[in-house]
Image (spheres, rainbow, N blue to C red):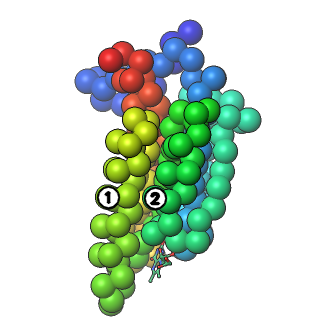
Amino acid sequence: MATKLKNLSDHSAKNISNIGKKKFAVIVSEWNEEVTESLFSGAYQTLIDQGAQKENIIKHYVPGSFELSMAAQWLAAKKEIDAVICLGCVIQGETKHFDFICDAVAHGITNVSLKYNKPVIFGVLTPNTQQQALDRAGGKHGNKGDEAAITAIKMLGLAEQL
Ligand code: DLZ
C-alpha cells in the first residue's frame, strides 16, 4: 500500500510503495551530542511513523561531522542499504574549522550520493550558537532530523517514479 507523507509539498514525490522493506542507515556525529541525539530521535520516529521497520534502521556513530562522508561511503556501498541519513551539528566558532568542516561534509555527502546513485541526506545543522541548534533539534523551530528522514523517503519515492 502506498504511504502518504505528511509535511511535504504537493509538487514532491510523496508516494512510496514498500517503505517497510527499505533499509535506512543513519549516521550520527558525536560532536554536539545533545543536539545530534535529538536529531536522531526525530529522524528515527519519523521513519517509524512512515512505516519503516525498526530492524531496517541502522544507527552508526562517527567522531565528528567531518567523518560523515567517509562513513556514508562505506554504508552506501552496501547493496542492502537504500538510503543514508547523515546527522551532525557544526557550531560556528572563532576559527576557520567551521568553514572547512561544512564545505567538506557538504561536498563529501553529495559525491557519495552521486557515486552510489542513492539518497544520502545532509542532516547537518550549521548554526551560530548551541541554542540555535537546540531550537532546530526538537525545539521551537522543529526538528531537522524529521526533515532529513522525510527527504530520504521522498527521494526513494522519486526514484520509484523515474
Ligand atoms: C574539530 C571540530 C570542531 C572545532 N567543531 C566541530 C563541530 O562543531 N561539529 C562537529 O561535528 N565536529 C567538529 N569538530 C570535529 C571534526 O568534525 C572532526 O571530527 C575532526 O576535525 C577530526 O577529523
**Residue bearing the label numbered 2:** 69
Residue 107's label in the rendered image is 1
Give the alpha-carbon distance from disc 1 to disc 2, as whole Å.
8 Å
* Residue 104 found in image quarter: bottom left
Mark 2 C-beta to ligand 1 under 8 Å: no
Residue sticking out furthest to the bottom: 94
Q: In the rendered view, would you say 117 is above or below 95? A: above
Determine if residue 112 is in view: yes
Q: In the rendered view, would you say 76 is above or below 156? A: below
From the viewer's perspective, tell me whether residue 153 is left or right of residue 47. Answer: left
Q: Residue 16, percent across and down?
A: 48, 19
Q: In the rendered view, would you say 20 is above or below 107? A: above
Q: Residue at x 42, y 72 (%)?
A: 90
Q: Residue at x 42, y 60 (%)?
A: 124
Residue contact between numbered discs 1 and 2, judged by CB atoms under 8 Å: yes
Residue 43's label in the rendered image is none
* Residue 45 found in image quarter: top right
Q: Residue at x 50, y 59 (%)?
A: 70
